[in-house]
Amino acid sequence: SDFCFDSIKKDDSVIDLGAGLGSFIIYVAKNFSCKSLEGIEINKSTVIYSCMIAYLEGVTPQIKLGDVLKLDGKNKYSKILVFPELASDMEIPFTEKALDLLSDSGRALVFLTQGFLFAEGHGYKDARKNLIDGGFVEAVIELHGGVLFPYTAVPTCLLVLSKGNKAVRFVDASDFYENTRRGASSLTTEAANSIFEMMKEDSDKSRRIDYEEIKAKDY
């Protein structure tokens, strides 16, 4: 079926791999009701800060100290956000861990550098091949290079993972941003909504490509 974002629902199990200061977890806790909600972060100080921020926001999600790569995969999740250290050797292991934790009907959203999509080295090509051959890639969203500044100015993309796919929805969202007062770029709520709409049909910014075409171009 074609791509369509769905909201977090009451029976969803949600996890943030690399939760940082907990912004996603706190947002979900304030705006959605779900079966379980947790974040995993390896930096102890960051976990303390995120718990303090959650307390000030009036919510109490589980933000745990731990190593994402050591999660055993016994518990499955229907909604997963993945934010590895970009342009590092953690991108592929974090992506593989998301698949290990993903339920059969779930969806994972992974922040990656755009090099993951095209580069031959660093294991990227083999990772792409495994994802496509396994039917795991549902969509790729190209973002503007500065939307994660000052965290990073590296051009990024969002990889949407689920199971049983035979085609990929490619979306060029590189023009969807606004400049903040400090000169950085930001992805607005309006822009995000526009991206969701672009998922539904082909346009000059959105195209659905069969896996066989990707394989024919050597992934």
Image (cartoon, rainbow, N blue to C red):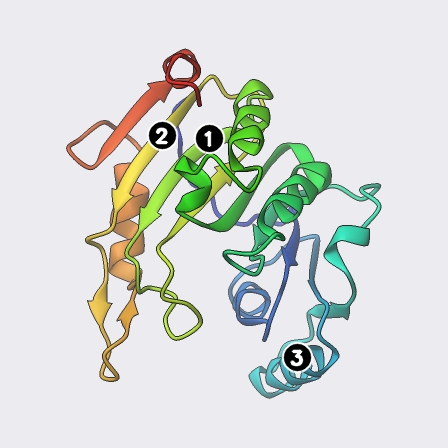
Q: Earlier in the sequence, mark 1 or mark 2?
A: 1
SS at mark 1 in the image: strand
Q: Residues within 10 Å of mark 3 (few under 14, many from 20)?
A: some
Label ID, residue 138 = 1
- Farthest residue to the left: give it: 204
In the depicted structure, whether residue 31 falls above or below residue 139: below
SS at mark 3 in the image: helix
Residue kind at label 1, given as amino acid type: Glu
In the depicted structure, whether residue 16 falls above or below residue 20: above
In front of the other: 77 or 34: 77
Residue bearing the label numbered 3: 46
How far across and down, in percent of the image, does residue 115 sit? 42, 45
Q: Residues within 10 Å of mark 2 (few under 14, many from 20)?
A: many
Q: Residue at x 63, y 79 (%)?
A: 50
Q: Quadrant of the N terminus?
A: top left
In front of the other: 191 or 124: 124
